[in-house]
Image: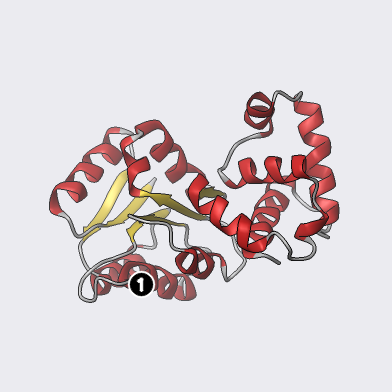
Amino acid sequence: MRVVLAEDLHLLREGLVHLLRAHEFDVVAAVESGPELLKALVGHRPDVAVVDVRLPPTFTDEGLQAALAARKQVPGLPVLVLSQHVQQLYARELLADGTGGIGYLLKDRVFNTEQFIDAVRRVAGGGTAMDPDVIAKLMVSNARNEPIARLTPREREVLELMAEGRSNAAIGQRLFLSESAVGKHTASIFGKLDLAPSDDDNRRVLAVLAYLNGR
């Protein structure tokens, strides 16, 4: 699996390169600035990009904007954003085009190797991998939006775990539900969010996007 990595801190960048390669990813480019990132993403068209939000030259949201610009040229390009803090604006910009293959993790999660590698793989596969803290902030701001308000408290719990990228079996274990019960909840969620019948994996992504984007 081919990866483009963007991180301006040399030690962290080298550490991430080593970690990804140790898990059999092919890091085709490891860059440290926004312009370099955009060039690498469009040139390499990787299976997934792992991107620090703040990069030179502005140290604001240069990494995110480069990733978004690349997604316009390479539609559906999977992007996993890393940030020091939760910023709702960053999350909303990432979610705005309504397609999957997106993730937003706090940098602290990188130190949990299993969680980080799972997030990279999930995003590369077209799914979502949203940090629980990001989900919590977006959930509060979207609580009154329709059709989100139609969901029961249990359905919201299920959808929050879906946004983290968890399978029905994993959701069942977390909420002490059978897998079939989780399946019934997800079917109800799809119906309440007016998602037309289609591939279930696709509907999971669409449900998460609708929930997090307040649509």
Q: Is residue 28 left or right of residue 48?
A: left
Q: Residue at x 38, y 57 (%)?
A: 46
Residue 174 at what x, y percent from top left? 63, 27
Between residue 138 and residue 184, name the one nearer to us. 138
Q: Residue at x 28, y 49 (%)?
A: 27
Say if residue 55 shows up in the picture: yes
Tag 1 residue: 66
User: What's under tag 1, amino acid-wise?
Assistant: Ala
Between residue 10 and residue 213, name the one nearer to us. 213
Is residue 118 depicted above or below 173 in this figure?
below
Is residue 200 depicted above or below 8 in this figure?
above
Say if residue 131 shows up in the picture: no
Q: Quadrant of residue 173?
A: top right
Is residue 188 depicted above or below 206 in this figure?
above
How busy is the neighbourhood of tag 1: few (under 14 within 10 Å), some, or many (20 plus)?
many
Q: Quadrant of residue 144?
A: bottom right
Q: Residue at x 63, y 35 (%)?
A: 167
Between residue 18 and residue 46, name the one nearer to us. 18
Residue 5 at what x, y percent from top left? 29, 55
Q: Is residue 42 left or right of residue 191?
A: left
Is residue 179 depicted above or below 209 in this figure?
above
Q: What kind of element bears circle 1?
A: helix
> Which color scheme is applied?
secondary structure
The C terminus sits in image quarter: bottom right
Furthest-left residue in view?
10
Residue 99 at what x, y percent from top left? 60, 63
The N terminus sits in image quarter: top left
Count numbered badges in the picture.
1
Q: Is residue 159 left or right of residue 45?
A: right
Residue 130 at what x, y percent from top left? 51, 49
